[in-house]
């Protein structure tokens, strides 16, 4: 067998396959280089889904003229110098593979200028072959144009999706970059149309631009420190949960990553607030010492390993639990009505305003302004569209527009008992009556409370069943005829090692001969299930058994609570109403039903008097 040493043009194309899978991969590598270069303003332009052309322009530090050609050599990088640097990687890029890989499968033009040089330097590369280098007039920073991706590797080109699909991948990626780097102003342009135009004024504003006003109005700030680890970000109220995890963004030291453990820590923290099959929306940044996390796991750099994963899970879980549990779940209808009224008579055309924002028609000084960029645009539109308006908002500062920060720090990882807002709400109330034998009406100070009796009782029962599980106090019943089932060697080993897990959930399971097990009792909640189907489902994916248990029991508990709760139309006595309302005072009681519907609506006396024209 003859061993061949491959020439550089071949092995560069092979290695490019690991780094450059599609146009989004090119955008990712180039934007990360811009961020590492200290850019505060980055523009990304794509044409035909990035297949035809990708242009990334930044105002970063630039590349020295003598290093222009070296930047495209394999394993050439400014991020690390020796093996020790791999232990404390702080930059987004570090492998030195990206530019070489991109240049080997496309036509590349680079223009870059540093602050110390009068002129910029221009270099063109086609399929890895260098053209002439020349001086050119250019501002400080770097511009890279990548054209005709995979023009010399047709096998890779034909496996790309349609331009619209590739564009969608880039758009999702840019949304992640914007959320991960809210201090940087981004412009993202697709086929000459501006999609995102951000102003570098913080994460809340970035989430407004990415997700819109409804999400922005329902953000809960997450802020938690534990020694050398901190968690910061926002999570949307559980009432705004989604059908999948695509609305979840995780950053580790500013790097966008995919990490199931962190996602699970968030999911577990909100399990009592959202219904089964739904997922929270969040953007979360975990900062920790660089030596405590390994980012050199995969060429895409999207996977990370933690030195102490259990500790990180606990910190994230506690941070989310604290943010969600301290939120107020009484729906203040007065505030909602006032918010609606405030936008019913706008002094400018809303559609025109949004088009102005998204099209970036006002850019002057917006990247350096201490005010919200929306303020300047609002004033401009007011002047253009309504000269008679006397509205003056030029002095509204960003901190008055963005969700206010919470400076509270919690040093312990233990879940402290949060302040019980419900106890205050349900003290000194007066029961007025019951509407439609469904909605309890209460007078509380200068407010009217409307309570859904079914939703409230459903939550009470759900919490009761949940506490029984956690306290190993589930009501169980013996089976008239024990259920016996056979297993293979792998399943037998798994069940032998996890008998206590099943017993913890009230399932009396024991070995029954070789490769055989017997079920003698089950929780009352599971009295109607098909045990054969249940165990086939559990054993179908042994690695997910714990999660399956939690999801399965949560679904069963919710159904049982709904089935057993007081129904709409059921007539309650005064003592039964008082008993139900008093139950809301208990610590940890969430004023949402297990399906996420509100239990209590609140109207102020002032708003009610407005309805009757007593006040204007």
Image (cartoon, rainbow, N blue to C red):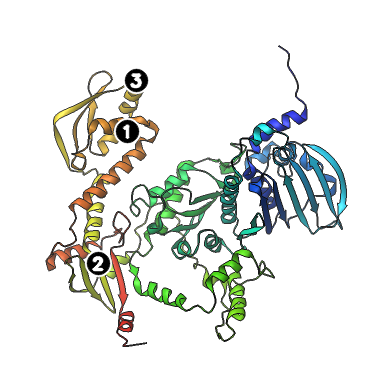
Residue in the picture at 58% in, 36% down: 297
Comparing 533 with 288, the one in front is 533
Would you identify the image quadrant in which residue 24 lies?
Answer: top right
- Find residue 260 and report its horizontal and vertical position in percent: 47, 42
Q: Dot 1 corresponds to which residue?
A: 538
Q: Earlier in the sequence, mark 1 or mark 2?
A: 2
Comparing 45 with 567, the one in front is 45
Q: Are marks 1 and 3 in contact (CB under 8 Å)?
A: no
Indicate whether 450 appears above or below 103.
Answer: below
Query: Mark 1 falls on what kind of element?
Result: helix
Q: What is the C-alpha distance between the residues marked 1 and 2? A: 39 Å
Comparing 278 with 312, the one in front is 278
Residue in the picture at 48% in, 52% down: 247
Disc 2 versus disc 3: nearer the observer? 2
Neighbour tally class for label 3: few under 14, some 14-19, many 20 plus, Cα within 10 Å: few
Q: Are marks 2 and 3 in contact (CB under 8 Å)?
A: no
Q: Dot 2 corresponds to which residue?
A: 451
Q: Earlier in the sequence, mark 2 or mark 3?
A: 2
Q: Earlier in the sequence, mark 1 or mark 3?
A: 3
- Find residue 338 and report its horizontal and vertical position in percent: 40, 76
Horizontal side of 248 relative to 504 (left or right) equals right
Q: Dot 3 corresponds to which residue?
A: 489
Residue 394 in sight in this render: no
Q: What is the C-alpha distance between the residues marked 1 and 3? A: 16 Å
Residue in the picture at 30% in, 41% down: 552
Indicate whether 569 appears above or below 525.
Answer: below
Residue 156 in sight in this render: yes
């Amino acid at each position: 067998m003859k061993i061949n040493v491959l020439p550089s043009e071949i092995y560069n194309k092979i290695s490019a396959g690991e780094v450059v899978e599609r146009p989004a991969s090119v955008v990712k590598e180039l934007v990360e280089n811009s961020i590492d270069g200290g850019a505060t303003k980055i523009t990304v332009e794509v044409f035909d889904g990035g297949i035809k052309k990708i242009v990334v322009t930044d105002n970063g530090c630039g590349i020295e003229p003598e290093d222009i050609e070296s930047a495209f050599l394999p394993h050439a990088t400014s991020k690390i110098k020796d093996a020790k640097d791999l232990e404390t990687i702080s930059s987004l890029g570090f492998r030195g593979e990206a530019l070489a890989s991109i240049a080997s499968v496309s036509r590349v033009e680079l223009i870059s200028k540093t602050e110390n040089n009068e002129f910029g330097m221009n270099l063109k590369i086609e399929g890895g072959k260098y053209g002439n280098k020349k001086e050119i007039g250019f501002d400080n920073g770097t511009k890279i144009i990548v054209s005709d991706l995979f023009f010399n590797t047709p096998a890779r080109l034909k496996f790309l999706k349609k331009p619209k699909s590739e564009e969608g991948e880039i758009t999702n990626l840019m949304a992640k970059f914007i959320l991960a780097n809210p201090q940087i102003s981004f412009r993202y342009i697709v086929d000459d149309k501006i999609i995102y135009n951000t102003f570098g004024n913080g994460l809340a504003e970035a989430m407004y631009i990415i997700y819109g006003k409804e999400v922005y109005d329902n953000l809960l700030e997450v802020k938690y420190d534990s020694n050398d680890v901190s968690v910061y970000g926002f999570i949307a109220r559980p009432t705004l949960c989604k059908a999948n995890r695509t609305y979840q963004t995780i950053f580790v030291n500013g790097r966008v990553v995919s990490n199931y453990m962190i996602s699970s820590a968030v999911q577990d923290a909100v399990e009592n607030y959202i219904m089964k099959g739904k997922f929270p929306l969040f953007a979360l940044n975990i900062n920790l010492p660089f030596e405590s996390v390994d980012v050199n796991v995969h060429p895409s750099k999207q996977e990370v390993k933690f030195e102490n994963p259990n500790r990180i899970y606990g910190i994230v879980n506690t941070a989310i639990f604290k943010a969600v549990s301290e939120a107020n779940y009484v729906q203040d209808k007065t505030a909602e009505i006032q918010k609606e009224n405030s936008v019913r008579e706008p002094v400018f055309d809303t559609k025109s305003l949004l088009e102005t924002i998204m099209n970036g028609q006002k850019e002057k000084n917006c990247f350096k302004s201490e005010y919200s960029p929306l303020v300047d645009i609002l004033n401009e539109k007011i002047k253009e569209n309504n000269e008679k308006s006397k509205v003056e908002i030029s002095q509204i500062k960003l901190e008055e527009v963005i969700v206010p920060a919470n400076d509270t720090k919690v040093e312990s990882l233990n879940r402290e008992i949060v302040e019980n807002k419900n106890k205050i709400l349900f003290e000194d109330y007066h029961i007025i009556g019951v509407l439609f034998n469904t909605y309890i009406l209460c007078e509380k100070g200068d407010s009217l409370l409307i309570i859904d009796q079914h939703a409230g009782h459903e939550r009470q029962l759900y919490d009761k069943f949940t506490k029984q599980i956690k306290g190993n106090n589930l009501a169980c019943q013996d089976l008239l005829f024990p259920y016996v089932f056979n297993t293979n060697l792998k399943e037998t080993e798994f069940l032998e090692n996890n008998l206590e897990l099943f017993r913890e959930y009230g399932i009396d399971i024991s070995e029954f001969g070789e490769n055989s097990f017997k079920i003698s009792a089950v929780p009352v909640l599971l009295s109607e299930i098909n045990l054969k189907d249940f165990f086939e489902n559990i054993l179908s994916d042994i690695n997910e058994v714990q999660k399956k248990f939690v999801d399965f029991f949560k679904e069963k508990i919710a159904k049982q609570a709904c089935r057993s709760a007081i129904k709409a139309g059921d007539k309650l006595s005064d003592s039964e109403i008082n008993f139900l309302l008093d139950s809301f005072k208990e610590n940890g009681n969430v004023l949402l039903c297990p399906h996420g519907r509100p239990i209590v609506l609140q109207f102020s006396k002032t708003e009610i008097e407005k309805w009757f024209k007593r006040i204007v």
